[in-house]
Amino acid sequence: MKKVYNIGVEATLEVIGGKWKPIILCHLNHHGKIRTNEFRRLIPGISQKMLTTQLRELEHSGLINRKVFNQVPPKVEYSLTAYGHEMDPVLNLLCTWGENHIEKLIDNGEDVLLMQRDEDIAVDLLSQ
């Protein structure tokens, strides 16, 4: 049976939808290569099981690479594929829109805290 999408964003959300996938992709976009334990530090609210599931789905979609190093203890690194890097403009726009939304919430008197701005992550990487 042919799969039907009513609008293109349905196909996008099928691949990157949910709470965690865009966050994982944004971190990979900024950091390049990330090990599993580093993801746990960068995304404190995610469980190990959910992280593993989301990484497998992103790998299956062709957006990320999983590289296993043959050593003890085992080392696994994740990075964006060339196809995954095609999401860079989309991810950057999502981050910018989110930051603007947070500013609007603060202006409306809501008690909101943004731990790290998108541009700060990029600046941190340049200084390393």
Image: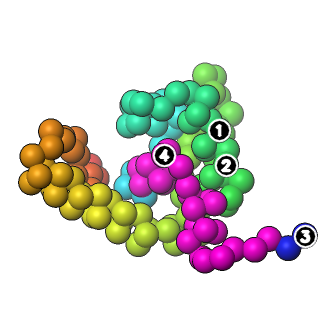
Please tell me whether residue 6 belongs to the stretch shown in magenta.
yes
Relative to 86, 88 lies left or right: left
Question: For the residue labelled by badge 3, is the local secondary structure a helix, a strand or a loop?
Answer: loop
Question: For the residue labelled by badge 2, is the local secondary structure a helix, a strand or a loop?
Answer: helix
What amino acid does circle 1 point to? Answer: Thr
Q: Position of residue 92 (x, y in %)?
A: 35, 66
Please tell me whether residue 10 belongs to the stretch shown in magenta.
yes
Camera-nearest label, 3 or 4: 3
Please tell me how crowded label 3 is: few (under 14), some (14-19), or many (20+) other residues with Cα within 10 Å. few
What amino acid does circle 2 point to? Answer: Glu
| Residue behind mark 1 | 53
Please tell me how crowded label 4 is: few (under 14), some (14-19), or many (20+) other residues with Cα within 10 Å. few
**Mark 3 to mark 2 CA distance (whole Å):** 22 Å
| Residues drawn in magenta | 3-28
Label of residue 1 in the image = 3
Report the residue that reaches farthest toward the top.
73
**Mark 1 to mark 4 CA distance (whole Å):** 13 Å
Label of residue 57 in the image = 2
Question: Based on the displayed image, in which of its 4 quarters is residue 6 positioned?
Answer: bottom right
**Mark 3 to mark 4 CA distance (whole Å):** 29 Å
First in residue order: circle 3 vs circle 2? 3
34 lies above or below 102 = above
Q: Position of residue 44 (x, y in %)?
A: 39, 30
What amino acid does circle 3 point to? Answer: Met
What amino acid does circle 4 point to? Answer: Lys
